[in-house]
Image (tube, helix red, strand yellow):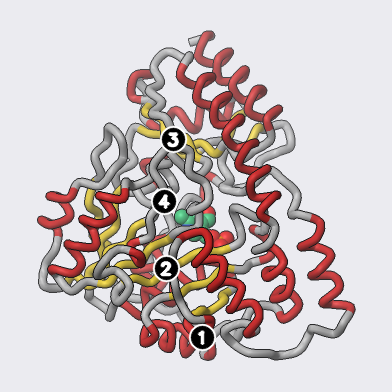
Amino acid sequence: MPSVSERYEGLGVGFAPYLQPPGPEIVRWTVGEPGFDTPTEIIETAVQGLKNGQTKYTRGAGSKELCQSVADYLAKHHGIEVSWEDVVVTPGAKQALLYSFLITTMPGDEAILLAPSWASYEPMLEFIGAVPVHVPVNMGNFHPNMDAIRNAITDKTRMILINSPCNPTGAVFTPEEVEEIVEIAVENDLWIVSDEIYGRMVWVDWPHVSPFTVPGGSERTIVINGWSKSWAMTGMRVGFLTGPTEAVRAAMKSQANSASHIPTFMMEAARVALQCDESVELFNQEYLKRREIMVDGLASIPGLRVPEPEGAFYVFADITGTGMTDIEFADRALEAGVQLIPASLVNGGEGFIRISYATEESEIHEGLRRIRSWLDGE
Ligand SMILES: Cc1ncc(COP(=O)(O)O)c(C=O)c1O
């Protein structure tokens, strides 16, 4: 057999080793997936689309109606003003991220990630030959350290990626922090890729602010978002990007030469989803409840430090007080019947575990019971 290209040698797969479906007896606190059914009207629209023959090739960036709805949605919820022609609907936010990395870097160029960051960014950058540079956040509150960002910039730096609200830390950057990051990008003529997939899940009294809306931001920010999280549509694989027109044209070329477009019958379903504000709000109420149960439950366990998550649906807990490494903690939690992610799988996550509280409430209670009884038996 011929050999597989060297591109794959040593390439990571993010959190995947700890995301494998365990047996049904295991409580799963791992998957970043809403524990809710996709709203019925979205499913019915997709089914109707199939029945109506929306099964053929169509406009690559997404139907005009869908792109217009995305533009309207961004203006209404995030203050982002763009034309429908500057929207590209992609197979998941992940694909949009890949395009944004291709657009902003050449092989050998450096991209700044705020560590710890979502596990897929690093391998995705490496896949295309770009060099991820991990800049640690302040580990007390997981907010960016501006001096560290400034010090990490070299003549090879092309892009800085921000993900607020953040997976895995739950941090929501303040408007002032976002402004300062844009300032740094302007000073150094850098792109910003802003992954805003958790933009509707903010639990603090400052808003999620997109760098696109900050002075100097709109000409250098590629905004990434998608339907997976707030509409419980992870398996439907729909996301989008927008940004400066030249970057969007490059994204269209990327899509034309790879995925072509999202499934045609999903376009109207994704459009309908953007009007399902009630479901988004309902899910958010549930997440708030689950967050409280998870945070209170974990905080009462000796040895765990549990900073209050400001957004998204993750708890990022410091387990160093248990005397275990995060890998030991995760492996032994699995033996006790709870699957969670040891954060040292990503740069800067040593000593922490990531827990998703998007799961059902009963699973949160049962997992807490199992962890308590395991640690009580120590
Ligand atoms: C920060 C972040 N960005 C992007 C994605 C991918 O989203 P999608 O399902 O739309 O590809 C995820 C999914 O876990 C995520 O946590």
User: In front of the other: label 4 or label 2?
Assistant: 4
Contact flag, marks 3 and 2 (Cβ < 8 Å): no
Q: Amino acid at mark 3?
A: Pro
Left or right, 32 with reference to 154? right
Q: Secondary structure at mark 2?
A: strand
The residue that disc 4 covers is: 208
Alpha carbons under labels 1 and 3: distance apart: 36 Å
Contact flag, marks 4 and 2 (Cβ < 8 Å): no
Q: Amino acid at mark 2?
A: Val
Alpha carbons under labels 4 and 2: distance apart: 13 Å
Q: Secondary structure at mark 3?
A: loop
The number of discs equals 4
Alpha carbons under labels 1 and 4: distance apart: 25 Å
Q: Is residue 104 visible?
A: yes
The residue that disc 3 covers is: 309
Residue pictured at 65% horizontal, 23% vertical: 365
**Dot 3 or dot 4, earlier in sequence:** 4
Residue pictured at 13% horizontal, 57% vertical: 150
Mark sitting on residue 223? 2
Q: Splitting the image into 4 quarters, where does residue 290 fall? A: top right
Residue pictured at 18% horizontal, 74% vertical: 189
Q: Amino acid at mark 1?
A: Glu
Which residue appears farthest toward the right when viewing the image? Answer: 51
Q: Residue 283 placed where, x, y %?
A: 65, 43
User: In front of the other: label 1 or label 3?
Assistant: 1
Left or right, 187 with reference to 336? left
**Dot 4 or dot 2, earlier in sequence:** 4
Mark sitting on residue 85? 1
